[in-house]
Image: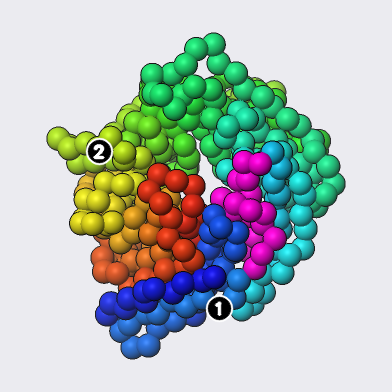
Amino acid sequence: MVHLLSNLLVGLTLAPSALGATLLVSHFSGPVYTLSLTTSGTTGKLSITSQASGCGTTPAWLEYYNDTKTAYCFDESWMGSGVITQYNVGNDGRLTQSGQTRTSGNTVHGKLYGGSDGKGFIATAQYSPSTITTYRLPLGSGQVQLEKFTMSQRGPNQRQDVPHPHETQLDPTGKFMLVPDLGADLVRIFKIDASSGRLTACPAGQASPGDGPRHAKWWKSADGVLRLYTLNELGNSVSSWNVVYPTDSNGCLAISRAQTISTYAPGKKGGPTTKAAEIRVAGNFLYATNRADQTFGSNQDSVAIYTIDPQTGAIAWKEAANSYSYYPRTFEINKDGTLVAFGGQTSSNVAIVSRDPATGKLGNLVANLQVGNKGRAGEEDGLSSVVWVE
């Protein structure tokens, strides 16, 4: 049952492109919702327009592809079996299931890759089994590869008992797959065979002990300088990585860590239960959310903002802003860079916050809506993922 406990509207002049915006939201209890953001004068309003089932028992992540109007939902079920579900996204945002395949469960992320159009296969990360699994598309065409990771000794953090791959992330060329591994303090790198979908391991990037890299994003300067940034969940930090491409088609992409900066202001640090969650890049700004720090009051966690040097890609602390959510596990910036959608996992809300593309600063709360039942702090329940449909 959907509980709509809040719909807080705060005055703001919105960019015309925000009119009629649509978002997709997954909830750990099972549903995938379609939300509409509308404006009237200087106020914004979020509302649920439809909901879909079919993503198993524990939907954990959504990936949306605007060119094909398709969304993929990944089920994190811990019961030994899960699903990947494909939806067609209608003009009104309504979801229609168009494909599905069974998995071994515990999938926390997935990404399309390979083939003639970059959408011939799908790679997924399984947190507790310490595996990545690839499948041929369309869904139901069979598994291509299963890679099991091991490590010789535990890491310094108690959660680093075994490898914990947390994401499958493409490089900008689509020729390499990167897998941040929270348990092993590695960013694993694989070379992609676009025809077969096979992944071949390359030397991994080494994070600092106890960092626990979770997710990664790319940035490219006007002059072509490429940087990789990782969000380190356990270390409550972000890292910047140098990137070197091979000189021949048989070589491997290589990365080396250049910087690591806290997700808290200089002189401050997170508490015993805080965990960095998600990372985004927009223009020459980097954003990273913190869970359970309540920097801005009860159940109001922070988002760290960094500047990116336009020539070198080096990052520097700018400020912290309010995410207007508790346990902001997920967030995404709209295409115009004018609005940010934060998904609070424990608060189970979607908060739309204004953003200035020129300064990178976050501003007022535009609209807020509770979606589904609230979660419990530190548990795998509540809201799991939010994406703009654009």
Secondary-structure class at tag 1: strand
Amino acid type at mark 1: Thr
Quarter of the figure with the C terminus: bottom right
**Residue at the outermost left position:** 267
Q: Residues within 10 Å of mark 2 (few under 14, many from 20)?
A: many
What percent of the width, then of the height, locates residue 154? 47, 16
How many discs mark residues in the rendered view? 2
Report if residue 83 is visible in the image. Answer: yes
Is 36 drawn above or below residue 72 in the view shown?
Answer: below
Residue carrying label 1: 49
Task: Give the label on residue 270, or none.
Answer: 2
Q: Do the residues labelled 2 and 1 touch (CB within 8 Å)?
A: no
**Residue at the outermost bottom position:** 41
Residue drawn 26% across and 46% down? 293
What percent of the width, then of the height, locates residue 165? 56, 32
Question: Horizontally, is 290 left or right of 194 in the view?
Answer: left
**Does the magenta-highlighted stretch encompass residue 62?**
yes
**Does the magenta-highlighted stretch encompass residue 247?**
no
In the depicted view, which residue is nearer to us: 86 or 5?
5
Residue drawn 47% across and 56% down? 382
In the depicted view, which residue is nearer to us: 266 or 6?
6
What percent of the width, then of the height, locates residue 69? 67, 66
**Residue at the outermost right position:** 141
Quarter of the figure with residue 129: top right
Quarter of the figure with the N terminus: bottom right
Q: Residues within 10 Å of mark 1 (few under 14, many from 20)?
A: few
- State which region is magenta: 52-79
Amino acid type at mark 2: Gly
Give the Cα distance between marks 2 and 1.
37 Å
Quarter of the figure with residue 271: top left
Report if residue 184 is visible in the image. Answer: no
